[in-house]
Amino acid sequence: MMLQPMWDNLFRGDKTKKTIFSTLKGNTLFKDLSDYQIRLIQNLVNIRHYRAGEVVFHQGEVGVGMYMIVKGTVDIFVEEANLKQDIQQNFVTHLREDDFFGEMALVEEDGRRTASVVCREDSTLIGFFKPDLFEIINRSPDAGVKILFRLSQVLATRLSETTSLIKTLKSKAHR
Amino acid sequence: MKRQRIYRLLFFLGTLAAIFFFILWVRNLLTSFVIASVFYFLLSPARDTLERKGLHKAMAAILPFTLLSIGAILILWAVVPPLTSEMESIRVDFPKYLDSIQHTSLNTKIYLSKILPIDLAMQITSSLQNGISSYVEGIFKNVPEVVSSSLTILFLAPLLSFFMLLDGRNIIRKLLTLVPNNLFELSLSLNHQISTQMGDFIRARLWETVIYTGFLWVSFLILDFPFALLLAVVGGIMNIIPYVGPIIGAIPAFLIASAQGLDSTVYAKLLFIYASAQIFDMVVIIPFLVAKIVNLHPVTVVLSVIVGSQILGVLGMIISLPVASTIKITISAIYKHLTGYQID
């Protein structure tokens, strides 16, 4: 429950179309971009298909980018060691169509994944990774700046949510 | 699911291996591919700039390629006639050079037999003579084969570089779709790191070669040494090979000086030119252009040059550093992917 602000989609829209173009256009990172720029990104991103139960990434792996869900549902787990040093998996939340996750890896240097993501059903994800972001910045700096600005907003929002949660927990602990 | 992942991985690795062996197997394809890569990394920044200006991706590829082709034709127009006449002159005088080598070797033998035991002097001079003769023969007797290969490469390399420029990104993207999901991020990141480093490395070495060749050419012209352009080009290209390259590149100039019976001050001047070029390369060019792009230990550099020469000869020596650097990036990325994290 503690990590939910890090993983919950605070930017979820109400779209029902599930094409790559509409998923990108509906994503908060790309919402300032023109249709032409979205099409440029559509040609750069990586469409990946996963089976139910397949792991998207493991906690602790080096991450290089984020995923957007076009179709399907994924579960987020955090692995923690208990007092007996046994590793246990704690369910954090599940994400569905139009949600996204892993965006911190877009800006981190050799950042490691802070949770594991497993597909609950057959899913189609769009992978948007650091090399793709660099290519956009290189080929269309205007689009790159807009994406980076939105990315900063997303990270700032998550930080602010996490900070307020920590404050709440601290005040509860003091009582 | 695990079996499917393994099949997918095997299919991806099999495709990579097939491409690799095809490039090695088809005659002249490897050299054409290396030259095409040089052109690709040279032109890709121009293509990106044109794309940023709003040009269609096909036009952004065609325009710099056309400009480079025109530039290359103009340079060849200016450089080929003097180079051909210099090579022709060397070919005509070839017996004279062999005589001169034999003469020098005889003098050396007489000199050594005065200061060393006769057996040892004979052994040293005969191995020296054999080494120099095979070196000279290797250079000049292979000329017809080199010319025929050059024509194939002259046709293949621009063609390959054009398609790399136009569709290279899509081809790599298509190839990466074959990678299983669990290795996709790692492969994509590796591809990005390797191509960025290759681009930086090739552009830096290309500038280094141009500046180094120019330095030698001007120095030879000032000295009024024969075959100035040819010797500068050979020296510049050989300089790409670490450590031994500059020595291999300097040998032809000393052989020509010896064959033409030039006096000993010319040898001193040649030594001064090559030493100055090396110092200029080490003090000015490398620190500003090449340093830190390929962060390899000197021992690794020497070993990779030896391995490269044994597998692919001179071409292997030239490409040994980028290949070693690619292997280093790959190993370090895989190691990082597999290790280095513990759950608290």
Image: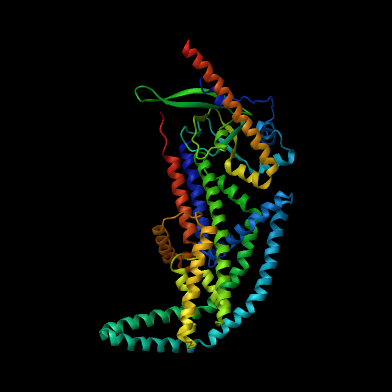
The structure residue drawn at horizontal position 56% and vertical position 55%, both measured from the top left corner, is B200
Q: Is residue B238 visible?
A: no
The structure residue drawn at horizontal position 26% and vertical position 86%, both measured from the top left corner, is B118
Q: Picture coordinates of residue A112 (x, y %)?
A: 49, 35
Residue at the top extreme, as displayed: A175
Q: Note whether B259 is above or below B212 in the view shown.
A: below
Front residue (pair B140, B181): B140
Report the quarter where the C terminus of chain B lies: top left
Q: Note whether A26 is above or below B19 in the view shown.
A: above
The structure residue drawn at horizontal position 62% and vertical position 50%, both measured from the top left corner, is B169
Front residue (pair A155, B4): A155
The structure residue drawn at horizontal position 45% and vertical position 51%, both measured from the top left corner, is B328
Q: Is residue B133 visible?
A: yes
Q: Quadrant of residue B313?
A: bottom left
Q: How many marks?
A: 0
Q: Picture coordinates of residue B321 (x, y %)?
A: 47, 59
Q: Picture coordinates of residue B71 (x, y %)?
A: 68, 67
Q: Picture coordinates of residue B311 (x, y %)?
A: 43, 64
